[in-house]
Image (tube, rainbow, N blue to C red):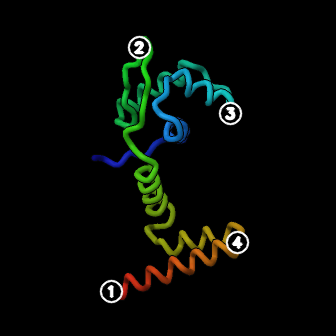
Amino acid sequence: MKKIIPTESELEILQILWTRQPLTIRAVHEILIQKRAIGYTTTLKQFQRMTEKGMLEKIPAGKAHEYKTLIGPESVRKGMFNKLLDNVFNGSTSELLMHALGNAKTTEEELNELEAFLKKKRAENRE
């Protein structure tokens, strides 16, 4: 299957559905308008496009339809990460990590987690 990299608006809809699917377009729209002004027809068109792209599945539910995702958060994260890594950091994971750590406040707990992760990766590389 082709990697799907959602737009910002598509990602917003996916994140809503991942937490409480299946939902109707109206239910998702009600959540979206709490964050920003958006017309119902815009939300409807977004659902149509996302269904065509293979991100969503339409499920009959009485007179309405409900939608559920066909792609999960990990798949989306992986595709978006790889695109960022390739397009912004020329494929260099170390540059990406150094940039992230240099531009954000990192807690001692996070640094300990990173050290444990690096220790584990080093051990895997020796195997």
Whichever of labels 2 and 3 marks the residue nearer the N terminus, that label is 3
15 sits to left or right of 62: right
Location of residue 65 with respect to 56 vertically, above or below: above
Callout 2 environment at 10 Å: few (<14), some (14 to 19), or many (20+)?
Answer: few
Horizontal and vertical percent position of residue 36: 68, 31
Q: Distance of mark 3 from mark 1, alpha carbons?
A: 49 Å
- The kind of residue on which mark 1 rests is Glu
Whichever of labels 4 and 2 marks the residue nearer the N terminus, that label is 2
Q: Distance of mark 4 from mark 3, alpha carbons?
A: 30 Å
- The kind of residue on which mark 2 rests is Gly
Q: Distance of mark 2 from mark 1, alpha carbons?
A: 56 Å
Residue under label 1: 127
Residue under label 4: 107
Residue at figure coordinates x 49%, y 83% from the top left: 119
Horizontal and vertical percent position of residue 111: 63, 76
- The kind of residue on which mark 4 rests is Thr
Whichever of labels 1 and 4 marks the residue nearer the N terminus, that label is 4
Residue under label 3: 35
Labels 4 and 2 touching (C-beta < 8 A): no
